């Protein structure tokens, strides 16, 4: 089932993450600007030495320029739309949606779609760079940050809770409010689930295979996940590239709650599995120690009196006693 999902989802995604794709960067970095402002689009991608010819597309139509940088001087509404580029040896880039606005206040963002863990920069920008004070940044209508003068703010590591509609407001004689910008944060990989190789219960001292299962990141090419395994608060193994780990079932006195973590290479994104309790034979006992002592004493007396001398100490009857204890 898992494999099937991976195959179905994997095929189109593999094309999407081709490392030969060209990449567009904006200078300044904002995907929305005011009319009359300047913005430069840069296209980077593999090409033959000396051949920097670049194809630019706006709304799917080729633009008459072959330079790797496309400069928009004094933007007009006609400059808004979906930009793509391609270098000599690259595939077509992902689109960049540039918006040209006319307003008093504009909430600028570096992108409208992010993968969790990416930084998100926001800027509350006033028409003609006029000074604005007492700025408030809002998410879904609720203010979450106040700034008297600094109009920029960066969420260093986005997570799924940052999905929403953002806007800002600021004062200059009266209070101005920007339009809303919808921000989407995509999950890089789901939180892992820890599974064991065979069904419970386990015998103390046996080997057990633990598997930290998640779906590999599809958004970022060449991204590798690192796995850590824990029992209770003890680390079994830290940051291995294998999602499988083989371990001995813990001693009785140890904690039996196993869990794992999956992390990205840079450690910026770490996700933890729910705890998995491994039921171990002989550990289900909830009765007090004195009860066992009396129980063993009774069994001991019975076997001593019913079995011939010598047999009471042989391994078979010992393990019978063990069974009684285990299945009590
Ligand atoms: C845009 O660039 C031109 C020349 O490159 C410059 O004169 C102008 O001031 C710039 N506009 C803005 C809003 O920065
Ligand atoms: C590109 O499409 C957007 C809407 O999708 C439109 O606002 C813009 O004017 C178009 N640009 C050109 C140059 O056709
Ligand atoms: C998301 O990030 C914010 C900080 O920016 C943090 O307070 C919050 O706990 C995080 N949420 C999750 C689900 O990780
Ligand atoms: C556990 O993993 C080892 C090595 O990866 C393998 O040889 C063994 O068959 C596995 N055991 C079970 C019960 O899956
Ligand atoms: C780990 O757990 C054990 C028992 O649950 C406890 O005694 C110990 O203090 C814990 N260690 C840390 C570092 O939390």
Image (cartoon, helix red, strand yellow):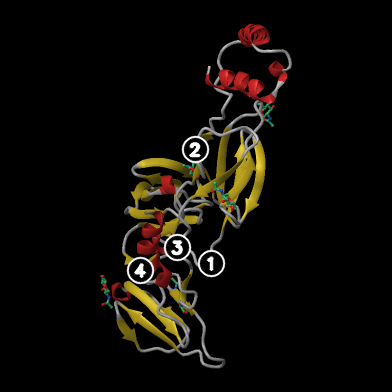
Query: What residue sits right under mark 1 in the picture?
Result: 222
Q: Residue at x 32, y 54 (%)?
A: 179
Q: Label 4, label 2: how many angstroms apart (C-alpha)?
A: 39 Å
Assign a secondary structure to mark 2. Answer: loop
User: Callout 2: few (<14), some (14-19), or many (20+) C-alpha neighbours within 10 Å?
Assistant: some
Q: Is residue 195 left or right of residue 4?
A: right
Q: Does the residue at mark 4 contact the one at mark 1 (Cβ under 8 Å)? A: no
In three-dimensional space, the C-alpha distance between marks 3 and 1, rounded to whole angstroms, equals 10 Å
State which mark lies toward you, 4 or 3. Answer: 3
Q: CA–CA distance between discs 4 and 3?
A: 19 Å
Q: Which of the two residues, 6 or 30, is positioned nearer the viewer here?
A: 6
Q: Residue furthest front?
A: 308
- Identify the residue position indicated by label 4 in the image: 97
Q: What residue sits right under mark 2 in the picture? A: 274
The structure residue drawn at horizontal position 66% and vertical position 42%, both measured from the top left corner, is 236
- Label 3 sits on residue: 219
């Amino acid at each position: 089932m898992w494999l099937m999902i991976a195959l179905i989802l994997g095929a189109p995604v593999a094309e999407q993450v081709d490392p030969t794709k060209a990449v567009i960067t904006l200078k300044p970095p904002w995907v929305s600007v005011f009319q009359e402002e300047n913005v430069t689009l840069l296209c980077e991608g593999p090409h033959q030495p000396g051949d920097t010819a670049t194809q630019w597309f706006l709304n799917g139509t080729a633009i008459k320029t072959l330079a790797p940088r496309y400069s928009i001087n004094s933007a007009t509404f006609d400059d808004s739309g979906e930009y793509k580029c391609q270098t000599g040896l690259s595939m077509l880039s992902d689109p960049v949606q540039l918006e040209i606005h006319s307003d008093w206040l504009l909430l600028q963002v570096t992108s409208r779609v992010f993968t969790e863990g990416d930084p998100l920069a926001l800027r509350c920008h006033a028409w003609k760079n006029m000074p604005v004070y007492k700025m408030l940044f809002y998410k879904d209508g609720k203010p979450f940050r106040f700034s008297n003068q600094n109009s920029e703010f960066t969420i260093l590591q986005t997570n799924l809770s940052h999905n929403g509609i953002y806007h800002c407001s600021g004062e200059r004689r009266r209070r101005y409010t920007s339009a809303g910008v919808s921000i989407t944060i995509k999950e890089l990989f789901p939180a892992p689930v820890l599974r064991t190789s065979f069904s419970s219960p386990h015998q103390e001292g046996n080997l057990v295979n633990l598997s930290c299962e998640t779906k590999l990141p599809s958004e970022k090419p060449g991204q590798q996940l690192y796995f850590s395994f824990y029992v209770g608060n003890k680390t079994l193994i830290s940051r291995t590239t294998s999602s499988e780990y083989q371990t001995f079932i813990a001693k009785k006195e140890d904690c039996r709650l196993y869990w794992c973590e999956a992390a990205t290479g840079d450690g910026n994104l770490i996700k933890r599995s729910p705890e998995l309790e491994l039921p171990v034979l002989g550990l289900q006992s909830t009765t007090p120690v004195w009860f066992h002592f009396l129980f063993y004493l009774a069994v001991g007396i019975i076997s001593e009196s019913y079995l011939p001398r010598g047999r009471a100490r042989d391994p078979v009857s010992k393990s019978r006693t063990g069974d009684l204890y285990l299945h009590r």
